[in-house]
């Protein structure tokens, strides 16, 4: 597609519910990031994929968070047993390649509200 | 730990003014630096990308500079307009083999008529 697509756009979850957030990167893009943006804050790194390989998951806040990109294209961020502190906008970004010559394109994000 | 700092945190100006937004970073291992704008409830829109080998980039009324030695980048906005009102984010790529993105906290810009 022409841009990075994220779905759903909005998600309201009851505390304890599991959620799955989807990211469709630009076709052919190798690199994919997930970020978490709390209200009034800058985005914080969660995880990075290069094709299907998850090269860095150091930003995932707990073992309730899990991300995958099994075929090197679409990625899913799963949050188990959601807590109120998980409420944030989750942003996905992709780039043609990793490294210095390539900038990143961001999706519009998924706004997760845990009630 | 890599850090990116943006100053000021918020800026309110009348229409027509020329603006300077500042970004500083602590780690000189940089692939590139990218400026984004974020409108309320929206995603990030890329404004300018400066490669590590470059000193500046220009697009329309926007000009961004990069000084790796001092760890600074500056975004200039000429002849500001109300439509420029948004949060501006400075994003540094580098510090890892794959160019991890580190964000500043943003500058909230309000341009009033």
Image (spheres, helix red, strand yellow):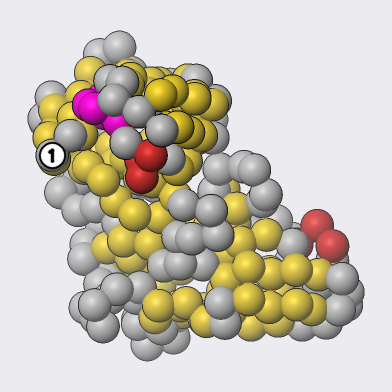
Vertical order, B6 against B105 (above or below)? above
Q: Residue at x 45, y 32 (%)?
A: B112
- The crowd level at tag 1 (other Cα within 10 Å; few <14, some 14-19, many 20+) is few
Q: Residue at x 24, y 27 (%)?
A: B79
Q: Residue at x 30, y 56 (%)?
A: A104
**Residue at label 1?**
B60
| The one of B2 and B97 positioned closer to us in this rendering | B2
Range covered by the magenta-colored residues = B76-80
Is the C terminus of chain B in the top left, top right, bottom left or bottom right quadrant?
top left
Q: Position of residue B83 (x, y in %)?
A: 36, 45
Decide whether the magenta segment is chiefly helix, strand or loop. loop
Q: Residue furthest front?
A: B113
In the rendered structure, the answer to whether residue B60 lies left or right of residue B2 reads left
Q: Residue at x 46, y 67 (%)?
A: A108
Q: Residue furthest bottom?
A: A71
Vertical order, B108 against B21 (above or below)? below
Based on the picture, tell me whether residue B77 belongs to the magenta stretch: yes
Q: Position of residue B86 (x, y in %)?
A: 45, 43
Chain that bears disc 1: B
Q: Position of residue A1 (x, y in %)?
A: 26, 83
Vertical order, B97 against A14 (above or below)? above
Residue A57 in sight here: no
In the rendered structure, the answer to whether residue A90 lies left or right of residue A29 reads right
In the rendered structure, the answer to whether residue B65 lies left or right of residue B37 reads left
Based on the picture, tell me whether residue A88 belongs to the magenta stretch: no
Residue B99 in sight here: yes
Q: Quadrant of residue B55?
A: top left
Q: Position of residue B7 (x, y in %)?
A: 47, 20
């Amino acid at each position: 597609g022409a841009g990075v697509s994220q779905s759903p756009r909005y998600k309201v979850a009851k505390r304890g519910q599991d959620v799955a957030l989807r990211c469709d990167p630009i076709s052919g893009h190798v690199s994919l990031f997930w970020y978490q943006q709390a209200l009034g804050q800058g985005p914080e790194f969660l995880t990075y994929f290069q094709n299907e390989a998850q090269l860095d998951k150091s930003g995932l806040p707990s073992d309730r968070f899990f991300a995958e990109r099994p075929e090197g294209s679409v990625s899913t961020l799963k949050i188990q047993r959601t807590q109120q502190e998980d409420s944030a906008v989750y942003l996905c970004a992709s780039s043609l390649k990793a490294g210095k010559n390539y900038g990143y394109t961001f999706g519009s994000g998924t706004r997760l509200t845990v009630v | 730990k890599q850090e990116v700092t943006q100053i000021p945190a918020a800026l309110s100006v009348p229409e027509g003014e020329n603006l300077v937004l500042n970004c500083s970073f602590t780690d000189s291992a940089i692939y590139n630096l990218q400026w984004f704008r974020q409108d309320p409830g929206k995603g990030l829109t890329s404004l300018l990308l400066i490669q590590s080998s470059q000193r500046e980039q220009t697009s329309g009324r926007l000009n961004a500079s990069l000084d790796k030695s001092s760890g600074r980048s500056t975004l200039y906005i000429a002849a500001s307009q109300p439509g420029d009102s948004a949060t501006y984010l400075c994003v540094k790529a580098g510090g890892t083999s794959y160019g991890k993105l580190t964000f500043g906290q943003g500058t909230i810009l309000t341009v009033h008529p």
